[in-house]
Every structure is written in structure tokens, then in C-alpha cells.
Image (cartoon, rainbow, N blue to C red):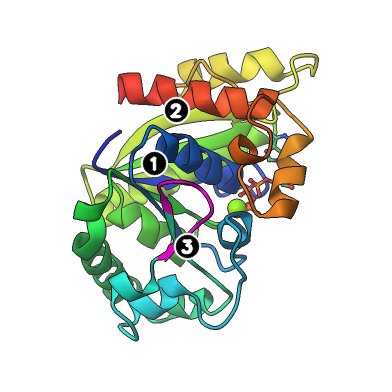
Amino acid sequence: MKNQILAIANQKGGVGKTTTAINLASVLGLIPLRCLVVDVDPQGNATTGLGHVVAGEGGTFRMATGIEEPQQVITKTREAGVDLVSACSFLERLAEQGEASGIRALRSCLEQVETYYDLILLDCPPSAGGLTRMALAVADGVLIPTQSEPYALEGVQGILQVISNVQRDHKPELRVAGTVLTMFEPEQPFAWEMASHLRHRYGLKVWDTVIPRDSVVAKAAALGRSVIKTEPCSRAALSYIELAREILDHE
Ligand SMILES: Nc1ncnc2c1ncn2[C@@H]1O[C@H](COP(=O)(O)OP(=O)(O)OP(=O)(O)O)[C@@H](O)[C@H]1O
Ligand SMILES: [Mg+2]
């Protein structure tokens, strides 16, 4: 996973993309690896979740439109080793300005800063639209968080289609860096079937570590911190630590 740009994407909303981006970055930052989270979602949840205010134009928009240099829009966070490029609703405009130029701009920005980081995580919006396609086109791999519900399969299917379109149009070498089951509730009817569906129907790698549903996630989000920093011994924190270890061992 080191020296990579990893997009965290699923066109379905509320599946744990942002929570995974923040907490993976937080664990890796403690190793210590140098991580950059680039918020590519106009909702700006990774921005607030890392303790920053969603305001102005946001760093991702400013750097991708050349208003500021990438180095100038990167901010530190309270998480050790984790830096952030913030987002806000202005980002929608980036997608409207044309995909090819957006991709070129974003790629060039990341190229300028990637030597400073071991890993760059792109937190994508819940859509198959322009911003997600841009993020995928500049990434080396895609991590797909998903819940274990029958309807969630459609979201995974949707993002796989987007990935295959981006491979065709922009980046043949883009790869799927696996799926991670989030908000896992073992007693739910479809909980255990999901992994085998993803493996056998879609040929996907499913990380063995699942992220349990844990109320500490909402508590941490309200504080603008990771669960690792808020409650390091919580089930959610321990599972993100385990997930990071598993991904580091295999990627
Ligand atoms: N493991 C978990 N346990 C309990 N709640 C969780 C967990 N992971 C995420 N949540 C909650 O679920 C909601 C959605 O999570 P999150 O924002 O990470 O998803 P997302 O896929 O980034 O959403 P969006 O598509 O809107 O960007 C949030 O309220 C978050 O606090
Ligand atoms: Mg999100």
C-alpha cells in the first residue's frame, strides 16, 4: 500500500467511505507513515472529520484550479502524521469544468506532493459522477467500503462499472484494492453472505477484517477526530488497526 494513491469509493452513500479514509490514515500516521487525505467530496465530511471547518473554496478546488499551489493548501490535522486537503461545495464546479482538464490538474497537483507522503487517500463522494471519475483516474487503486446488505451489492456493482469505464477512458492500470465490510452486524441476515457474494459473483478481494457497527464512530465524528484518537481501545478503533495491518501486509 505504500507509495500509492488510493481512492476510497462507492457510489452508494453512507457506507463508511469517509470513516475508513480518516481512520486508516490515522492508524498509518501512527506507524508512522506520512499520509495525506484529499477530500474530493463537496460534502466535506473528511474535512470536518479531521477537525477542520468546511469554508471558502476548500483546498482541493483551489489547487485543482490553480488558485494556489498544492503545498499551500495542505494543512496539518490533529492526527499524527496525517495532512489534509480540504473540500467544500465549490468542488462541484470542478466537475463542471470538464473531466479531462480536471484529471490533468489533479494529477499534476498530486505529483507535486507525492514524494512527501507514503500514502495519499482520496475520499470520494457518493456518486458515479465527474468527481469520482476524476479521483479514480488519478489513483493507483480503489478501496471499496460496503455494508453487508442485499441493496449494497448494487452500489458495489455500480462502482465496479465506473472503475471499468475509467480504466477504458483514462487509466488501464487502475486496480481494485479490495472491499471492506463496514458497520458489520453479525446477527443481520445477509451479514455473512455478503463476503462470499463479493468474492464469487464479482471476483473481488474482501479483506478478512470487518469493521463492526460501533457508536464511537459518531462520537469521534462529532469531535472532529478519528476513533483511534478518541477511543483507541474501542471495537471500531481496533478493527481499523487490524485492517491497516492486513492491507499493509498484502498490498
Ligand atoms: N463502523 C461504524 N459504526 C457505526 N457508525 C458508523 C460506522 N461507520 C460509519 N458510521 C456512520 O455512518 C454514517 C456514514 O458514514 P460515512 O460518512 O463514513 O460514510 P460515507 O460512505 O463516507 O458517506 P457519504 O456517501 O455521505 O460520503 C456516519 O454517520 C458515520 O458516523
Ligand atoms: Mg463520505
Residue 158: give x, y in percent of width and height: 52, 44
Residue placed under numbered mark 3 in the picture: 40
In the rendered image, residue 231 lying in the magenta stretch gets the answer no
Question: Of helix, strand and loop, which one carries label 1?
Answer: strand
Callout 2–callout 1 Cβ contact below 8 Å: no
Residue 20: give x, y in percent of width and height: 55, 40
Q: Residue drawn 30% across and 56% down?
A: 137
User: Which range is magenta?
Assistant: 75-82
Dividing the picture into quadrants, the one containing residue 236 is: top right
Residue placed under numbered mark 2 in the picture: 244
Dividing the picture into quadrants, the one containing residue 29 is: top left
N-terminal of the two: label 2 or label 1? 1
Is residue 160 or residue 228 the one in the foreground?
228
Q: Which kind of residue does numbered mark 2 sit on?
A: Ala
- Mark 2 vs mark 3, foreground winner is 2
Q: Residue drawn 55% across and 83% down?
A: 56
Q: Residue drawn 53% across and 80% down?
A: 90
Q: Which kind of residue does numbered mark 1 sit on?
A: Val
In the rendered image, residue 76 lying in the magenta stretch gets the answer yes
Quarter occupied by the N terminus: top left
- Mark 1 vs mark 3, foreground winner is 3
Mark 2 crowd level (few <14, some 14–19, many ≥20, 10 Å Cα): some
Mark carried by residue 142: 1
N-terminal of the two: label 1 or label 3? 3
Tell me the quadrant of ligand 1: top right
Label 2 – label 1 distance at C-alpha: 15 Å
